Amino acid sequence: MYVLLRNNKQEGPYSFEELASKNLNNFDLILKEGASSQWLYPCEIEELRPYLNKKSNQDIRERKSDFTKQQYIF
């Protein structure tokens, strides 16, 4: 069973299939009950990587690109 932390709200427990259907984002955190006391990002859990929201991954790359293009005046 898995617990999902999204937008500072804890949800679950979910089975693997239920969790995989939650449209996982890069900044969600996952706790696998009984296996660890450590919260992990979905990309850190190999079996969840195929279920990551591809749009979320693209948004992160775009934000990084935009950040590197910005110029700051101090």
Image: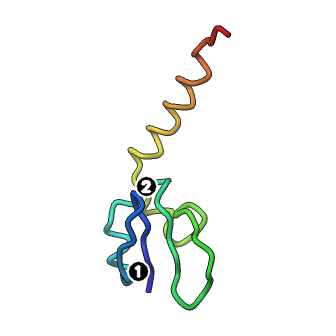
Which residue is found at the position 46% from the left and 62% from the top? 50
Question: Where the N terminus falls, by quadrant?
Answer: bottom left
Q: Amino acid at mark 2?
A: Asn
Q: Amino acid at mark 1?
A: Phe
Q: Tell whether 65 sits left or right of 19.
A: right
Q: Which residue is mark 1?
A: 16
Which residue is found at the position 52% from the left and 76% from the top? 31
Which residue is found at the position 42% from the left and 46% from the top? 56
Q: Callout 2: 10 Å neighbours few (<14), some, many (20+)?
A: some
Q: Which residue is mark 2?
A: 25
Question: Where the C terminus falls, by quadrant?
Answer: top right
Which residue is found at the position 32% from the left and 66% from the top? 22
Closer to the N terminus: mark 2 or mark 1? 1
Q: In the current view of this chain or complex, which residue is farthest to the top? A: 73
Q: Secondary structure at mark 2?
A: loop
Q: Nearer the viewer, residue 68 or 7?
A: 7
The colouring scheme, among rainbow, by chain, secondary structure or one colour, is rainbow
Q: Give the percent coordinates (x, y) of residue 36.
A: 62, 83
Q: From mark 2 to mark 1, how far is it between C-alphas?
A: 15 Å
